[in-house]
Image (tube, rainbow, N blue to C red):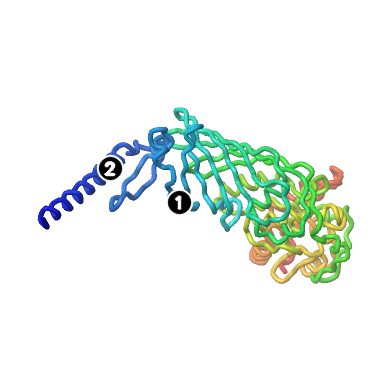
Amino acid sequence: MKKTLRFVLFGLLALVITTCVAAALIARFTLAPAAGEWQTRIKFGPVDFDVSVPSAIRVATSPWFAPWLDGRSLDTRFGTVHFAWNDSVGALELRCAPCSALLPALGSAPIRLDRLTATVRRDGNALAGTLEATPAANVGATGATLLRGNWDGRLTPKSLPINVDLPDAPIALWYAVLAPALPELQRARIGGSVAMRGQFTLPAGTFALQPRIAQFTVEGLGTEAMLGARTSCGAPAKLSNDSWLARAVIAAEDQRFFTHTGYDLTELTASIDSNQKSGHVERGGSTLTQQLARLLVTGADRTAERKLRELLYAVEMEQTLGKARILQLYLDNAPWGTDLCGADSAAKRYFKRSAAKLEPAQAVWMAAMLNNPQVAVEKWQRDGSIDAARAKWVAEGVRGVTRFQRDALLKNVAAAKFAPP
């Protein structure tokens, strides 16, 4: 009896092993990638092998295989993905809760979603479905509970380009979904709506965004108190909007300062494109108002959450402070080198005169330093000059001057030789 039982057990074990080996071989040869095809490496028991991602997607979304995925899950670098099969509409559902992704173009910390659900339907190589993002519980009063949109894409041997369309939704809901931990959401009253179109390409991870924002307002953050704020950087410069330094700073940092409402979508999308090409955040896309929010409130962490906080304060400051006060506060608090901030303190350190008495070329020189003050100071000390190309670009962008004044300014900037600090 024992011999018979042992024989049966060994037989069952051999059958299981044979079945697993056969399944692995079938998967290996069925999903084997062609030369140059998009592929990834998977582990099947003790065996690792490369599979074709397009083939795997076709299999996973086939009506004869997708029902087998129902109730199963898969650990990915974005989070654990749970599968469900909706037979009535022939769609595979993928749910990730929580889900996170690191997008270097948007910061050094991952973007985290509390709950993301996607559906997938396939017709040949054409894919389509829906996207739904749910905010975390108890995140302010958004007036809505679901961020919803549609997506489509076409599978190719080397990539999957995806188009995403998210129609108008309250800005408060976007904040609740993208940054539920922001303390400002408990007291800010956020108005307006956002619609978003995007293009994503896998596996490259490149993306392009086209946001559309309407009637963005913020109340309740208390920025009106900044009307009487005093700087710790030294004496206030008390510069008018048409002073040489004010105009040069606007040319260097925010050329649409007098026309935007705290944010500049053109500059923001351009910065995302630039950061993707470099692989890290090197261009912020922030307006002067956002930079002021960073200086006075949010700090300079390179994260998407900090950018979202900064945006809230910038929009409210535009409504409570006005352009003239924002510009004054920025000039009085902007960094101009290690342990040096404020226009008047910087002008006295570098040129031995007040900011109001700077010559046009000196004003351009100081404004050109703002994108990276410490690097500019080090170059000035080492080479006797700052970045000449950037100084020329700033001089070309100064507004409110005649052609004669601009020509003279460009000539003086090109010839400028100021003693290193």
Inspect the image, locate mark 2, and give the three-letter code of the amino acid beneath it: Ala
Dot 1 and dot 2 residues touching (CB under 8 Å)? no
Q: In which quadrant of the rendered image does the N terminus lie?
A: bottom left
Labelled disc at residue 204:
none
Question: In the picture provided, is 30 more to the left or to the right than 415?
Answer: left
Residue 42 position in % (x across, y down): 36, 48
Taking the spot 59% from the left edge, 43% from the top edge, the residue there is: 132
Query: Does residue 243 appear in this view?
Result: no
Question: In the picture provided, is 149 more to the left or to the right than 395?
Answer: left
Q: Which residue is mark 1?
A: 76
Question: In the picture provided, is 153 more to the left or to the right than 210?
Answer: left
Question: In the picture provided, is 144 more to the left or to the right than 248?
Answer: left
Mark closer to the chain start, 1 or 2 = 2
For the residue pair 349 and 279, the one nearer the viewer reads as: 279
Taking the spot 70% from the left edge, 46% from the top edge, the residue there is: 144
Q: Secondary structure at mark 1?
A: strand
The single residue placed furthest to the front in the displayed view is 1
Taking the spot 83% from the left edge, 53% from the top edge, the residue there is: 318
Residue 125 position in % (x across, y down): 46, 30
Labelled disc at residue 23:
2
For the residue pair 125 and 186, the one nearer the viewer reads as: 186
Taking the spot 60% from the left edge, 49% from the top edge, the residue there is: 275
Residue 395 position in % (x across, y down): 77, 50
Q: Secondary structure at mark 2?
A: helix
Residue 116 position in % (x across, y down): 56, 47
- What's the CA distance linking mark 1 and mark 2? 22 Å
- Which of the two marks, 1 or 2, is nearer to us in this view? 2
For the residue pair 365 and 307, the one nearer the viewer reads as: 307
